[in-house]
Amino acid sequence: MPCDFVRSLGAAIARVFRDKAGAAATIVAIALPCLIGIGALGVETGVWFTIKLQNQSAADSAAISAAYEVIAGRTDVTGELTAAADEAARRNGYKGATPTIAYPYSDGTVTNGIAATLQQSQGALLATMFLSGVTIANTAVAVIEVFGTLCTLALGSSGTGVEVAEFVQLEMSNCSAAANSISRTAIELDGSASSISAATLVAVGEVSLNGSRINPAAPPPQFILSSPALIGAPDVADPYASILIHSFLVSGMPKTGRCRSSSVGVVRIYKGNCVIPGSSLTQANIKLAASTQISGGWSIQTGQTVDLSPGTYWVTGDLNLQSGAVLECSSCDNIQGTGVTIILIAQANKVGALSIASGSMLGLNAPHSGQFAGLVIVQDSNELPSGTTYTSSHSTIGGKMGGSLNGLVYFPNSSLTFHANPSSAGPKCLLLVSSSVKIDATSSLDTAGCTAAGLANLPMLSRVALAE
């Protein structure tokens, strides 16, 4: 129709110029507004197209920003994702209504994506003859891609998150370390004689050697990385925060019945599914059965040997393993999948801390199945009873060389001083989640065998890409 109009108008104009009757001025006066309107519509359409191009960049930024919120564990569409998307869009010149976020989003191309839709109403100025305005809509879809697993996750937002002490080598070549700290020493090597071997390092802040920031593109030789370190990265969420909650960890814990015992030779053997004060476990050689609550804290003294049967043990206070003490599970088998879980559980508004001296002998692996599969030592941390506090915000896990730990060590609200190695037999799985960690002696961490060891839900490294 517009083409027919233009042709008719053109023919009329031609007739005007041939007309000798003096009506040319009248016809031109009638036609001129239409000509101006058509030209204005073309100009304004170009303006709207420019705005749409600009808003597409804003939509891309909005979708990417919302996706990074998801990576950080913030998934509330209204309160978190929309706010992040709106801020990102407006930083990119967007002036329309609040973005609409769809999560999770799926279509024929994308599954479990994050879609951001922007709508900006634009009134007509020159082209009001034909329409009053338009709505300019843009949509972008982001996806989260997993590209690695973490064997160290430091959740604290300040200070040094992951520290490797001087003269210490940390080996975790098939997994990575991440620190949510904003510090310039979020991940720190203390001396030129220390080293870290990893798939990569990820820090919200920066990575440093002796307090000096490194260049991720050209790191010092102490950093042996398969991929360049990522600095200024988004937070990495704790994948266990909604799983390892108090009500889950306390499930199955016996609350009544004193543990009975008998002696076989020099070994004092206690029955399970009962409660025993830690202060009464004073014999030199002790064998505990599964499903035991050790109440009031427990200190394993120098010269004592405690042998745990496969199963779960709850400690309602501090657990201390002194130098020269032994804590092991002689009947556990990391190949067959039998193991133990020790839980420092909240009781009487307190959660105990852990202290394992470097001169002690520690040999424990997590069970491969059951309620606490893959968990070896856990501090009660999430959805605690109101008013609960910690006896200490720091724990220590050491032990002599030759000992081992296998499974998840979980202390998300505490700092750790740590050294250990995964089991030498069976699937290797040793990973740490803590507020911060200092590796104080040569250690190795590994996630290659975690799925086989019963721990399928691993901390992941993710990145964001635009799909649409």
Image (spheres, grey):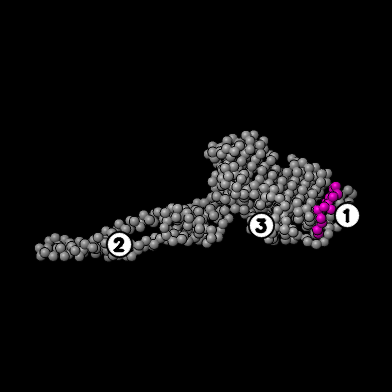
| Residue under numbered circle 1 | 262
At 34% from the left edge and 56% from the top edge, which residue is drawn? 47
The circle drawn on residue 127 is: 2
- Classify mark 2: helix, strand or loop: loop
- Classify mark 1: helix, strand or loop: strand
What amino acid is labelled 3 in the image? Asn
Q: Does 154 sit left or right of 319 as displayed?
A: left
Q: Does 384 sit left or right of 280 as displayed?
A: left
- Closer to us: 401 or 356: 356
The stretch of residues the image draws in magenta is 274-287
In the rendering, at what x and y percent does residue 401 appear? 74, 40
What amino acid is labelled 1 in the image? Ser
At 63% from the left edge and 52% from the top edge, which residue is drawn? 458
In the rendering, at what x and y percent does residue 237 appear? 59, 53
Residue 176, by quadrant, is top right
| Closer mark to the observer between disc 2 and disc 1 | 2
Sooner in the amino-acid sequence: mark 2 or mark 1: 2
| Residue under numbered circle 3 | 382
In the rendering, at what x and y percent does residue 133 appear? 35, 63
